[in-house]
Amino acid sequence: MDNHALKNGSTAFLLIAFSLLLFKCGQREDPAKQEWINLFNGVDMKDWKPKIRHYALNDNYGNTFRVEDSVLKVSYDQYDSFRMRYGHIFYKDKFSHYLINVEYRFTGNQATGGEDWARRNSGVMVHGQSPESMLKDQDFPISIEVQLLGGLGEGERPTANLCTPGTNVVMHDSLMTDHCVNSTSKTYDGDQWVSVSILVLGDSLIAHIIDGDTVLQYSKPQVGGGVVSGYDSAFKVDGTPLTEGYISLQSESHPVEFRKVRLLNLKGCKDPKAKNYRSYYVAADNGSCKY
């Protein structure tokens, strides 16, 4: 092959390669592809902030929250007595419309001094106030609690219930002011892993899901009611709609483990012309669109 042909061949190759590169760069991502975010990475707690009652934010008293064997554990082996030191560990970002999936299990024995109602009891808090806005002696964040319960070996004890520290919801077209409402889930005895999902759509709907079945749902979460103490009154204006907030996992005196905490954000770019458009988004954030 002479130099002229070699040169033309090389030029053609480069043009083809460049064209393929442009095609690849210009390709849209699959708008139906779900992009789950692993809030817990299985390695550390760098994206999480512990807040334990009577302690400052990020003071993880007694190494309550820890990562061992790729599991986020809530432990009390360094406590002399629990003494109502309720704790929560908050994810760094807040969300408004999403589906979150959590896998958890209860283990071992309750910490000395724990309340009887707190046996095999924990929770996933959604639409919560920021950890920075909690006062040092505040017991629970103003939030909606998806209560996680384990069976006690006798009788029924459903999980994925609703509890409302400093909040109310609307259920069956009526304002629900009871602190806790049971779901229709079955009882999970022993130390088995349980998968719970929570669908949160701003203040229009929150649904608790176990094994693909919706076991509880309600709407219009809002600030109100009691069962929270030690708070800054500036953050408890009753009647304020809860349209977004922080997610936290609870420490209530019984050891519990979380091996999966993942989230599908349902708010994002809704412009079909954008590269990052997703067909499953239900709320728009078109400021995030990429073209």
Image (spheres, grey):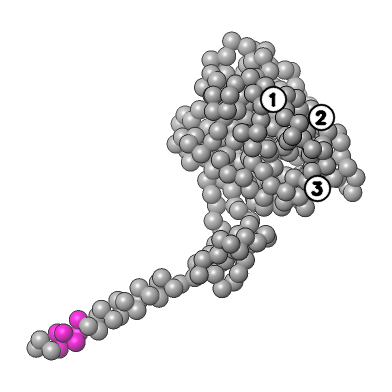
In the rendering, at what x and y percent does residue 199 appear? 69, 49
Q: Residue at x 47, y 29 (%)?
A: 68
| Sequence-wise first label, 1 or 2 | 1
Residue named by callout 1: 138
Residue type for callout 2: Gly
Dominant SS in magenta: helix
Q: Residue at x 67, y 50 (%)?
A: 96
Secondary structure beneath dot 2 equals loop
Q: Magenta stretch containing residue 79, yes or no?
A: no
Residue named by callout 2: 226
| Sequence-wise first label, 2 or 3 | 3
Residue named by callout 3: 220
Relative to 218, residue 137 above or below: above
Q: Residue at x 57, y 18 (%)?
A: 76
Q: Distance between the residues labelled 1 and 2?
A: 13 Å
Residue type for callout 1: Gln
**Residue 256 image-quadrant placement:** top right
Residue type for callout 3: Lys
- Horizontal side of residue 191 vs 70, given as left or right: right
* Chain part drawn in magenta: 5-10
**Residue 248 image-quadrant placement:** top right
In the rendering, at what x and y percent does residue 57 appear? 57, 28
Q: Distance between the residues labelled 2 and 3?
A: 17 Å
